[in-house]
């Protein structure tokens, strides 16, 4: 019978060594500022409602705050709160037309991130 201890041993090297030919090439590829920025994007998308908003914007291309509130079945204030967080993380952009504010995804990189993440999730579900 396999125990928790057996599982833990599979996840940790039994000897400590560094493969310098690999680590020397990888060290310094990303700057700390880039890592923090990447983490901020994932942090902003860590809320299911914000992921839903990003997906809806990917599909709808541009939606006003009222449309997003209706789709999320929440108040306009709640939708606006989530949209402000996404905008602060440079995930969305907005424009005002008359009395309405319309949001869209900031660029194709965010669209790709949403598409690839959903594809990964669907594949993961298929294999379970």
Image (cartoon, rainbow, N blue to C red):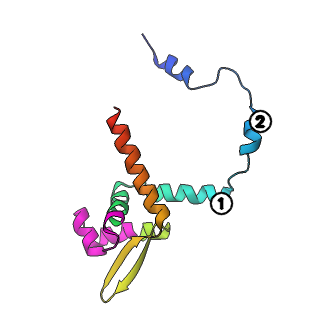
Q: Quadrant of residue 127?
A: top left
Q: CA distance from mark 1 to mark 2?
A: 25 Å
Image quadrant where one finds the N terminus: top left
| Residue 34 falls left or right of residue 114 | right
Instruction: Residue 69: say if magenta.
Output: yes
Residue at the image position 35 percent from the left and 54 percent from the top? 48
Which numbered marker is on residue 90? none
Image depth: mark 1 or mark 2 in front = 2
Q: Position of residue 43 (x, y in %)?
A: 48, 56
Between 112 and 2, the residue placed more toward the observer is 112
Magenta segment, which residues? 58-83
Q: Is residue 85 left or right of residue 78?
A: right
Residue that carries the numbered disc 2 in the rendered image: 21
Q: What residue do we see at 72% from left, 25% from top?
A: 16
Q: Which residue appears farthest toward the bottom when viewing the image?
A: 98
Q: Which residue is mark 1?
A: 33
4 or 105: which is nearer to us? 105
């Amino acid at each position: 019978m396999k125990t928790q201890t057996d599982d833990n041993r599979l996840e940790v090297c039994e000897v400590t060594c560094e493969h310098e030919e690999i680590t020397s090439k990888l060290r310094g590829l990303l700057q700390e500022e880039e890592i923090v920025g990447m983490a901020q994007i994932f942090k902003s998308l860590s809320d299911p409602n914000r992921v839903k908003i990003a997906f809806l914007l990917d599909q709808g291309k541009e939606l006003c705050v009222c449309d997003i509130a209706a789709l999320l079945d929440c108040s306009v204030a709640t939708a606006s709160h989530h949209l402000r967080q996404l905008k602060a993380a440079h995930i969305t952009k907005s424009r005002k037309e008359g009395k309405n504010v319309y949001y869209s995804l900031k660029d194709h990189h965010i669209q790709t991130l949403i598409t690839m993440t959903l594809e990964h999730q669907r594949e993961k579900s298929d294999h379970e």
